Amino acid sequence: QVQLVESGGGLVQAGGSLRLSCAASGSIFAINVMAWHRQAPGKQREVLASITTDGSTNYVNSVKGRFTISRDDAKNTVYLQMNSLKPEDTALYYCYARTHNFAGYWGQGTQVTVSS
């Protein structure tokens, strides 16, 4: 079992920045990929960025150049640095972890609201 706790969401003006954190606990040795997703009201959940144990990253086009995913293995934490935020980035942001045997775990989500 893996437990994930997100933090760092909030209200920010357009053009501003936020950094989300996702602290992992439990069977963290089994995790091989961690990712950030978001879900806006009335829309499907979408993956934004992912990072593997060797540090390889991938981003969806809509956030490339604005968002950066990183990890601090000493703190068992993954971050999402979000810059140049837009009102359309408003959503509930979720942390996700996948283990070597393809089990998936979700955090409870943290709300990000970008005002225009």
Image: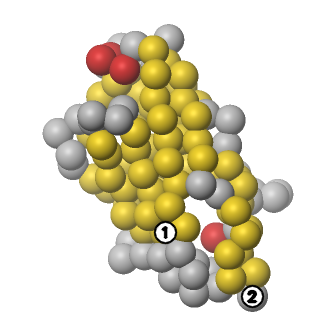
Q: Position of residue 57 (x, y in %)?
A: 28, 53
Separation of marks 1 and 2 at Cα, in angstroms:
16 Å
Q: Position of residue 10 (x, y in %)?
A: 70, 62
- Left or right? Give the position of 94 relative to 70: right
Any part of residue 63 in sight:
no
Q: Position of residue 49 (x, y in %)?
A: 42, 54
The local secondary structure at tag 1 comes to strand
- 64 above or below 45? below
Q: Residue at x 37, y 63 (%)?
A: 68
- Left or right? Give the position of 41 relative to 25: right
Q: Quadrant of residue 76?
A: top left
Q: Residue at x 39, y 72 (%)?
A: 64
Q: Residue at x 67, y 43 (%)?
A: 109
Q: Quadrant of residue 105?
A: top right
Quadrant assignment for the C terminus: bottom right
> Total of numbered circles in the picture?
2
The local secondary structure at tag 2 comes to loop
